[in-house]
Image: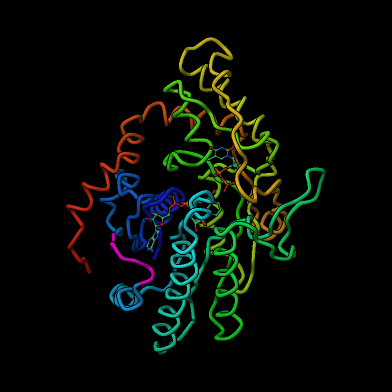
Amino acid sequence: MVTGGAGFIGSHVIRTLINNHPDYRIVNVDKLTYAGNLENLRDVENASGYRFERADICDYNRICEIIDHYSIDGIIHLAAESHVDRSIVDPFTFAHTNVMGTLSLLQAARTRWEALPDGYNGKTFYHISTDEVYGALPADGGFFTEETPYSPHSPYSASKASSDHFVRAYHDTYGMPCIITNCSNNYGPNQFPEKLIPLFINNILHHRPLPVYGAGLNVRDWLYVEDHARAIDLVFHNGRAGATYNIGGFNEWRNIDLVRLLVKVTDRLLGRPEGDSLPLITFVTDRKGHDLRYAIDSTLLSRELGWTPSLQFEEGLEKTVRWYLDNPEWVGNVTSGEYQKYYETMYGSRKNL
Ligand code: NAD
Ligand code: TYD
């Protein structure tokens, strides 16, 4: 079971699993919020082992039903509210989905798996989390390691930290085989255009302002989404139960430098003169509680499981910009809710199983 498989990272995870393990039965459990779009999976939706179940992870009974029906023996949990700015406006929704939803999923897996003759044997509950749980680093040095104490600042990171604690509690209390990975900022195709990179590509395309928060000096560590999906496949199959692994690309960028590079690449691909869109950069009021710097040390994952990122940043950025420029109707339909309406009609009242 992959939860949140219709979202940005989840759709890449499902595609990676289908490609790498064609014999698997994979059930995508997704509520299809504003951020979830089955359009992201159009190219793999007819794969023989793939099924979609529209369900809310907070709906305990329905999740139990799905676990039983498909004899689920592994869960990769990505379903979440994921945007920091939304969490600042509406923290309740983040606590509900990210904390209560994760708890409901853990409890459903526990009760169903404990009832089986072989119990937890061969089962895995894998939670996809974020580096934001560790708080913020100073500008001049240091990395988050797996031992860094949790110190979340935003309602989003507080909700993810809380859900990580519940996952560990299920491992420590009930012996459930659980794994957590904490990853840095992802970028790539199919990311909802409210996050920095896709929002700015779309704004450059339409000659709209590029709202850089504060002075643009905050630092993020960027990883191409397919490299993250590959790491997830590897950890799901080879990670140690009870372990935490950090995932990151050793690829730190100050926001302002990233935005200048993005302008350069996008202008070039649009055939505009170099620097044409730089005047669109607009410094706006800073995000409340804006974490200064994230930087991940992913040495443990490389050492234990041999994972390293495959793409250079400029290469990944160019692939990403190209994808957004080639798919303007995707951007239009996700932002207008057109796909939402379409799938509402298809799946609104239908219960699969
Ligand atoms: P996203 O917002 O693009 O997708 C989230 C998906 O979860 C959507 O398909 C949505 O419909 C689904 N969902 C939301 N609430 C649900 C519910 N109650 N029941 C079932 N499905 C529900 O998010 P993303 O960027 O793909 O992130 C996926 C996961 O990875 C999240 O847990 C996030 O915290 C984590 N993560 C993201 C990043 C990043 O840079 N995007 C980095 C590290 C970790
Ligand atoms: P974002 O993509 O929202 O990811 P996160 O907050 O999870 O790191 O933002 C990345 C960085 O870009 C972050 O420092 C906030 C900044 N930012 C802007 O300056 N302007 C924007 O419009 C957005 C969405 C983000």
Where is 65 relative to 17, above or below?
below
Q: Is residue 101 above or below residue 15?
A: below
Which of the pair 25/228 is nearer the observer?
A: 228
In this view, 331 is above or below 339: above
| Extent of the magenta region | 52-58
- Closest to the observer, 43 or 127: 127
The N terminus - image quarter: bottom left
Occupied quadrant, residue 56: bottom left
Q: Tell me: 265 left or right of 77.
A: right
Residue furthest to the front: 285
Residue 345, position as x, y percentages in the image = 17, 52
Give the answer, above or below, for where 39 lies relative to 124: above
> Which residue appears at 60% of the width and 65% of the height?
161
Horizontal and vertical percent for residue 57?
Answer: 38, 68
- Magenta stretch contains residue 167: no
Q: Residue at x 69, y 51 (%)?
A: 296
Count of numbered circles in the view = 0
- What residue is shown at x 56% (from left), y 84% (from top)? 175
